[in-house]
Amino acid sequence: MKILIAAGGTGGHIWPALSFYDWIDRNQATAEVLFLSGSRDLEKSLYIHAGVSPVVLPIAGSPLWGSPRTRISRSIGLVRSMKVAMRAIKDFSPDICLLFGGYVSVAAMVASKLLGLPLLLHEQNARAGKVTSFAAKLGIPICTGWEICDPLSAKRYLPVGIPVRQLRRLAPDEAWRLLGYNLDLPPGPRVLVLGGSMGSDPLTGLFRNISGDESFGGYHFFVVGSADKPVRVAENLLLLPRAWEIDLLYSIADVVISRAGASTLAELVAIGLSSVIIPWRDAAGDHQASNARIFAQKGFGTIWEDDSTLEKLLFMIDYELKKAGRGQASPFSGIQTSEASEKIWELLQQIAEGRGRN
């Protein structure tokens, strides 16, 4: 089977797509895959790291956001991207197109519809994005990362989970050595702070303040994606560059504080790390709040809001550390990361053969 995969925008869309591709590479020797991506530097870096050469569409953001000039430029880029996607479909002759969301998927969706190519969309978040809502109106089959995908009817989608890359759990000293920061690894408890693939300046500011608070003096914080190189800002605060080998960072952590991107939450479940989730409330449709709510309801972690007290954050960190100490970090520690990919593969086969969901 030949599969065209559209994935771009942020790591939250790209990592599940690359994880699914890795599963195909290990399990389906006869399958062929071609990727479509956007033109942001982040997208290029991710694909280079994965050793994948996508067809790059001439668009670097959603036409729905930005200044009037930016929206016009991106709208033109979207039209051009549709033409590039159509050309890729004609040259590659795929059996089906798999969409992982984001603005890149719009071009692939329209091109596939125009050329009569079957489609399947994977929505990672617990709240449907604009692309997913549009796909639902067009009758495109949808599979989801969670059992809930508001505001869509439960009959409109099939929960399959989120493909997760293979994650190692190394000894902290070994992981720190492989990261190559040439700094001594601070003692525990170590708190890893993740702001998402795009970074998060508000989280950096928050933990700059927290590191100077005597109540948090017993913890060492590692804020990822907040510097171009490792910087020790305070005795208990390190700002670290973005690292694509995320399992090395997970391996040094006793507890994780993270935004509520769906892919990151799925990884935290897979590797079994205790976590405090701080949803980014400016995310489109407030989807991170929906992700965090389901994550917490399942017992995977706790939620702290930006406007909550620092005392509550301190309590949550301590609570999650105690859970980890009791071996209760995740009810599904060591979850089979291939399960979601297997289900997506089965759906792709069914739809390509005309037996799939309507």
Image (cartoon, rainbow, N blue to C red):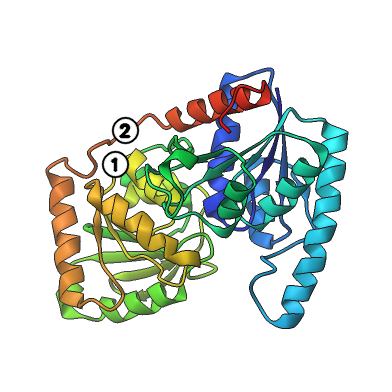
In front of the other: 58 or 324: 58
Residue 339 percent location from the top left of the image = 43, 28
Going by the numbered disc 1, the residue's amino acid type is Gly
In-image side of 151 versus 304 (left or right): right
Which residue, given by chain and number where applicable, does mark 1 sit on? 272
Asked if the residues shown at circle 1 and circle 2 are in contact, with their CB atoms under 8 angstroms apart, the answer is: yes
Q: Residue at x 75, y 68 (%)?
A: 74
In front of the other: 224 or 328: 328
Residue 334 percent location from the top left of the image = 31, 33
Residue 113 percent location from the top left of the image = 75, 42
In-image side of 94 versus 274 (left or right): right
In front of the other: 144 or 231: 144
> Element type at marker 2?
loop
| Residue 298 makes an appearance in the image | yes
**Hey, which quadrant is residue 204 in on the image?**
bottom left
Label 1 – label 2 distance at C-alpha:
6 Å
| 245 lies above or below 347 | below
Which residue, given by chain and number where applicable, does mark 2 sit on? 334
Count of labels shown? 2
| 179 lies above or below 27 | below
Q: Along the polypeptide, which appears first: circle 1 or circle 2?
A: 1
Q: Residue at x 25, y 48 (%)?
A: 300
In front of the other: 7 or 289: 289
> Element type at marker 1?
loop
Image mark for residue 164: none
**Hey, which quadrant is residue 316 in on the image?**
bottom left
Q: Residue at x 52, y 53 (%)?
A: 12
